[in-house]
Image: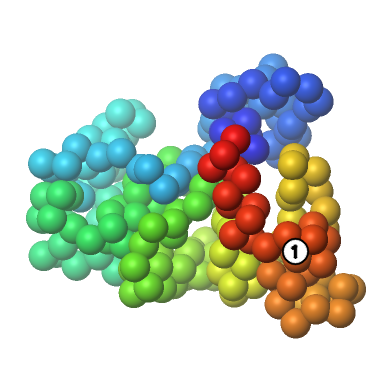
Amino acid sequence: LIRILGTLLTPDAGTAKVFGCDVVTDALQVRRHVNRVSVEAAFFKELSPWENMVYASRLYGNTSRQTRRRVIEILDLLGLSKDVVDQPMKQLSRGQQQKVAIARSFLTAPSLLLMDEPTTGLDPRSKKEVQAVLDTLRAEREITVLLCTHDMDEAAALCDRVLMLDGGHVLADGSPDELCARHGAGTLEDVFMHMTGKTLEAEEAEEVTL
């Protein structure tokens, strides 16, 4: 789904639109609105966050003056200190690298940020740091964030609206509180188990098998 909305994959059937633009026939227009952060974000590991950001900004067509101002603004917003942004990427923690990935995605000032499992594989502290960044961005920027996650606690904490998918079908749609109330459940994980008859661990195991 994330890759289809980001115009990286063509849907086999049906249609998908982003802000009224079809992801197939209006792909270029869609790309002007979106950017994507995934768990496997790629960087030049020998370069620093600053150098990676500057490189990406120039690829997006920004001038040197625009690049410096924009990079400083975004890194400050995400709380990346100078000692961090000057280190090679390979020396940073996974959480810090994900912060840089999020920062890089904002170089295009997207209206829609697609986040594909951005905290998967992170240690608890790094996970909390990335979640705090997402909460800050949601509060301070006029941007829509589409977060794909198997972590129901994360979804409950960060999302205004939750869609539960199973086998490509929408099982439930609503705010975390609405879904719990509708199904008489205490948590979103309980809702998922009620709707599917299986645990999240079983769901993830099925995906690995496929």
- Across and down, in percent, residue 38 comes to 44, 45
Q: Residue at x 60, y 35 (%)?
A: 210
The number of numbered badges drawn on the structure is: 1
Q: Nearer the viewer, residue 38 or 73?
A: 38
Q: Is residue 141 left or right of residue 91?
A: right
Residue 145 quadrant? bottom right
- Across and down, in percent, residue 2 comes to 59, 39
By what rule are the colours in the image chosen? rainbow
Q: Nearer the viewer, residue 87 or 109?
A: 87
- Across and down, in percent, residue 89 comes to 17, 49
Q: Which residue is mark 1?
A: 192
Q: Is residue 201 visible?
A: yes
Q: Is residue 26 visible?
A: no
Residue at the far bottom in the pictured view: 186
Q: Is residue 156 left or right of residue 125?
A: right
Q: Is residue 176 left or right of residue 172?
A: left
Q: Residue at x 81, y 48 (%)?
A: 170
- Across and down, in percent, residue 197 comes to 79, 61
Q: Residue at x 39, y 52 (%)?
A: 102
Residue 126 sits above or below residue 206 on the image: below
Residue 197 sits above or below residue 57 on the image: below
Q: Which amino acid is tagged 1?
A: Phe
Residue 30 quadrant? top right
Q: Is residue 146 left or right of residue 20?
A: left
Residue 10 quadrant? top right
Classify the position of the N terminus by image quarter: top right
Residue at the far top in the pictured view: 25
Q: Please, what secondary structure does the residue beneath circle 1 have? A: helix
Q: Mark 1 Cα within 10 Å, few/some/many (few <14, many 20+)?
A: many
Q: Residue at x 25, y 44 (%)?
A: 53
